[in-house]
Image: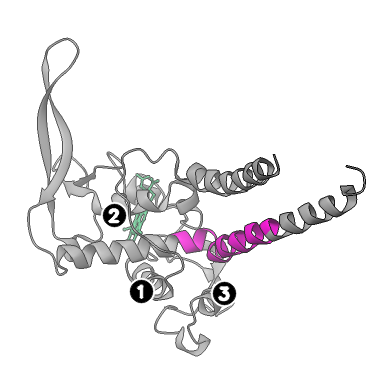
Amino acid sequence: MHKRLVLIAFALLTSASVSGVAMAEEGEGSLPHSGADITNIESLQRGSRNFMNYCSGCHSLKYLRYNRLATDLNLPESELPGNLIFGDAKAFDTIGTAMPADAEGWFGKQPPDLSLIARARSVDYIYAFLKGFYVDKARPWGTNNLVLPSTAMPDVLASLQGLQKPVYKNEKDEHGSSNMVLVGVEAMTAGALKPEEYDQFVRDTANFLDYAAEPVKAKRQSMGIFVTLFLLVFLAFAYMLKKEYWKDVH
Ligand code: HEC
């Protein structure tokens, strides 16, 4: 009986923490796993550099300040200007962009602020999105995207990745007529980075956006483990206390 109670309590505690993780990963469909690790500070440092060099021209991170970034990523604040801060922003400023607020006319859509994009979409989505550009002459920029069809974002990393071409498959629909369905992409020209290097580049960038969306995420997750352990230890004491109280009654 007692054993069973302990087992049930243990199952409840662990399932609570596991279901939290499962929920976070729901709805990502068949996206490839990015392998991004928010506790990997070096990856986040590289990701922040990638972001500042390749994305901040169009996208802001308006909920993140440079000095918070410096503290979390172990970067000396004195090294920010020239490395992460371009222009005359101060360390306590939030991460802005030079893109005017009415750039819609250029792209057909305003480049969104990316502070919360990893929470709105997911880190795997960003990873797949940045690997999903392919040549499509029908689009204004000459490229399209597997994950976000007809995206307004140009293929800004083409020089690093090289160009990709779409792969179609002939599929029959329920009426028996065959259609060409886009099933993936394959390399067409080589870029400055080898495929594994490009994957790492994109993984670091997506990882950095995951951090930006919730700077305390790594801390929260590690704290969760301690809280669960604490509850388990507490459970043992509570159980011993209960036995002590009831021992004369039985
Ligand atoms: C030349 C400007 C430009 C640059 C540079 C740029 N983007 Fe974008 N980005 C856009 C535009 C425009 C959109 C809106 C696309 C849409 O909604 O179709 C966008 C949208 C996005 C989205 C949202 C996609 C969605 O599902 O809503 C993500 C994520 C993103 N960009 C990531 C990046 C990253 C990471 C970089 C740097 C590697 C980058 N962008 C560089 C213009 C840019």
Q: Quadrant of residue 158?
A: bottom left
- Pick the residue in front: 244 or 62: 244
Give SS at disc 1: helix
**Is 53 rendered above or below residue 27?**
below
Q: Which residue is mark 2?
A: 130
Q: Nearer the viewer, residue 39 or 19?
A: 19
Q: Which residues are magenta?
A: 210-232
Which of marks 1 and 3 precedes in the sequence? 1
Q: Quadrant of the N terminus?
A: top right
Q: Residue 183: x and y, percent? A: 17, 36
Residue flagged by tag 1: what amino acid is it?
Answer: Arg
C-alpha distance separating marks 1 and 2: 16 Å
Vertical position of residue 136 compared to residue 87: above or below: above
Q: Mark number for residue 218? A: none
Residue 167 appears in which quarter of the rendering? top left
The residue wearing badge 3 is 68
Q: Residues within 10 Å of mark 2 (few under 14, many from 20)?
A: many
Q: How far across and down, in percent of the image, does residue 177 sit?
A: 11, 14
- Residue at disc 2, CB closer than 8 Å to ligand 1: yes
Which residue is located at x 42 percent, y 78 percent? 84
Check disc 2 and give the amino acid type: Leu
Question: Which of pointers 1 and 2 lies earlier in the amino acid sequence?
Answer: 1
Residue 172 sits in which quadrant? top left
Q: Main secondary structure of the magenta part?
A: helix
Asked if residue 25 is positioned above or below residue 173 in the image, the reply reads: below
Q: Position of residue 126 (x, y in %)?
A: 36, 52
215 left or right of 107? Answer: right
Crowding around mark 1 (Cα neighbors within 10 Å: few <14, some 14 to 19, many 20+) is some
Name the disc covering residue 46, or none: 1
Q: Mark 3 to mark 1: distance in Å? A: 16 Å
Q: Is residue 65 magenta?
A: no
Percent across and percent down for residue 190 are 9, 62
